[in-house]
Image (cartoon, rainbow, N blue to C red):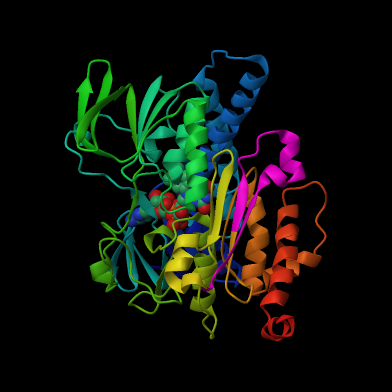
């Protein structure tokens, strides 16, 4: 029976990061995956979606210059497949082998807390990391399972996009794909049950983005509950209920993007003695499961289903597995981005979340970019930022709605992870004219307000 120091089940973001961290510690490492290495991010998530978005952006810009033209979406899918192949080169089976990581392709299942079965062989493992990820949630809408619907697993395998599509779900994935496909010439109907898209995001920016998408030509149906799906000769019919009335939407295809479910089935978690519920594997703050030598990371654990969170958890889980001192994963400094145009990035709380927790003690700084020189140079200025601080000036949350907001939010992340006051940015020189300058401007305002709110200054002013 083969024995390893660390066996990793699943080779997505969490699994691969764990593997490379483990070999860094000189451990004998085996990675098992039922598919090729790379996981969702490479094959059906971050990478293909961002490749499609980039291609769509290019076509959209070209149309703005030369006017409308026909576009063959098989070209976009070729770009997507090419980018996947390129990224896979850096994480292929051969690459893992060359880097000293053993890989077995097959379905892994615990047969005991220290033994894993794969391809009819038993592997013994001193420590195990479970990083089996998540799968698209299959909603129980009558008729859906009888039609050939798309999800993120099947969408990026297409050779050509459908002429028209219904997208079910106005979360990040639904929004990114709606804008990209519409820009590539697909007629898009987006259906969302809440009263607005991106309902967890800062309301003012989600509403602006909704307006933008509508202006670009996406048909957005908010407050709409999907009640029935039917196959037609020409495609799919979705019936939705909106304000008590039924409405029919037809399209060539339907994409379901309404949530995720943890991949825990068939893993033998009971045999391993690992506790779980139907949403996730239970872990403590050190990423340990109920079996202290088995760790779990990434989407299978949550709560934030992002590649960067899977990476952080993977590194920490391995360090905790091999080092005598264990460290906690700090979920509270998470940040994320919806890669629409403009992007909508978020770190920490929204204003309403902060108010719910801290009442009127919070300080809110809104800055719309119609006053920001760099944004003005490009002429479209519905972008902006909202910064929410506690009464001392520390960041509770921030939302950035702008070109490259995903890059901009990292400056806020730096402040948050170093636990610094926002006023520190008042003295940081930002190149002119850049979007980042907005943080310098707000920083100056915060520095003044900090002074004015100082009890001694208040007394003196009185
Ligand atoms: C369309 C889309 C766009 C996204 N965009 C972004 C983005 O821009 N930024 C971002 O941070 N996140 C994004 N995400 C989320 C991101 O893809 C996931 O959070 C991340 O991939 C999770 O990594 P993981 O390691 O937990 O799981 P995964 O990457 O899902 O890897 C799990 C692996 O486990 C394997 N596996 C499962 N069960 C078994 C078993 N029993 N035996 C063997 N192997 C098994 C699977 O084959 C898979 O390879 C996106 C997701 C989607 C769907």
Question: Quick check: 283 left or right of 428?
Answer: left
**In the picture shown, does residue 348 fall above or below 56?**
below
Asked if the stretch drawn in magenta spans residue 378, the answer is yes
Quadrant of the snapshot with the N terminus: bottom left
Residue located farthest toward the left when viewing the structure as drawn: 142
Taking 437 as reference, is 342 left or right?
A: left
Residue 419: image quadrant is: bottom right
Query: Which residue is rendered at x = 65% and y = 39% of the image?
Result: 381
Residue 350 visible within the image: no
Q: Nearer the viewer, residue 252 or 18?
A: 252
| Residue occupying image coordinates x 82% and y 52% | 431
Above or below 456: residue 171: above
Residue 77 image offset from top left, x and y in percent: 51, 27
The answer to whether residue 68 is above or below residue 285 is: above
What percent of the width, then of the height, locates residue 274? Answer: 29, 72
- Residue at 55%, 60% in the rendered image: 347
Q: Position of residue 435 (x, y in %)?
A: 72, 48
Closest to the observer: 22 or 398?
A: 398
**Which x, y percent locates residue 439?**
71, 58
Establish if 154 lies above or below 135. above
Residue under the image location 51 percent in, 31 percent down? 180
Magenta-drawn segment: 361-386
**How many numbered marks, from 0 up?**
0
Of residues 97 and 405, the one nearer the viewer is 405
Say if residue 269 shows up in the picture. yes
The quarter of the image holding the C terminus is bottom right
Q: Is residue 25 magenta?
A: no
């Amino acid at each position: 029976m083969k024995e390893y120091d660390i066996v990793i089940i699943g080779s997505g973001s969490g699994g691969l990061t764990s593997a490379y961290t483990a070999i860094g510690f000189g451990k004998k490492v085996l990675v098992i995956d039922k598919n090729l290495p790379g996981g969702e991010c490479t094959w059906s998530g971050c990478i293909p979606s961002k490749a499609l978005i980039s291609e769509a952006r290019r076509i959209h810009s070209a149309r703005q210059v030369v006017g409308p033209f026909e576009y063959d979406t098989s070209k976009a899918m070729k770009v997507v497949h090419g980018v996947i192949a390129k990224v896979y080169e850096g994480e292929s089976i051969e690459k893992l082998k060359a880097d000293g990581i053993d890989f077995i392709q097959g379905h892994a299942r615990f047969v005991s807390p220290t033994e894993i079965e794969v391809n009819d062989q038993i592997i013994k493992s001193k420590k195990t990391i479970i990083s089996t990820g998540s799968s698209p949630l299959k909603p129980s809408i009558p008729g859906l399972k009888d039609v050939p619907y798309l999800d993120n697993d099947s969408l990026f395998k297409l050779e050509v996009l459908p002429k028209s599509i219904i997208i079910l779900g106005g979360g990040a994935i639904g929004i990114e794909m709606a804008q990209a496909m519409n820009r590539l010439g697909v007629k898009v109907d987006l259906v969302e049950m809440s009263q607005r898209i991106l309902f967890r995001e800062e309301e003012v920016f989600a509403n602006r983005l909704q307006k933008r998408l509508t202006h670009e030509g996406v048909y957005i149906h908010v407050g709409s509950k999907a009640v029935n799906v039917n196959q037609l000769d020409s495609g799919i019919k979705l019936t939705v209920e909106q304000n008590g009335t039924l409405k029919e939407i037809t399209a060539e295809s339907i994409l379901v993007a309404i949530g995720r479910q943890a991949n825990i089935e068939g893993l033998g978690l009971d045999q391993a003695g690992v506790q779980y519920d139907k949403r996730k594997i239970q872990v403590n703050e050190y990423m340990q499961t109920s079996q202290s030598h088995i760790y779990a990371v990434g989407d299978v654990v949550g709560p934030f289903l992002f590649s960067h969170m899977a990476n952080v958890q993977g590194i920490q889980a391995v360090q905790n597995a091999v080092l005598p001192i264990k460290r906690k994963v700090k979920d509270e400094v998470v940040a994320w981005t919806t890669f629409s145009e403009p992007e909508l990035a978020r770190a920490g709380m929204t204003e309403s979340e902060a108010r719910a927790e801290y009442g009127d003690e919070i300080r809110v700084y809104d800055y719309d970019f119609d006053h920001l020189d760099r944004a003005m140079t490009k002429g479209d200025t519905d972008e902006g930022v909202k910064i929410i601080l506690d009464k001392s000036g520390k960041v509770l949350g921030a939302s950035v709605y702008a070109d490259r907001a995903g890059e901009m939010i990292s400056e806020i992340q730096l402040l948050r992870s170093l636990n610094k006051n926002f006023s520190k940015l008042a003295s940081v020189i930002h190149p002119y004219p850049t979007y980042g300058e907005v943080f310098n401007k707000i920083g100056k305002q915060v520095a003044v307000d900090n002074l004015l709110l100082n009890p001694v200054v208040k007394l003196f002013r009185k």
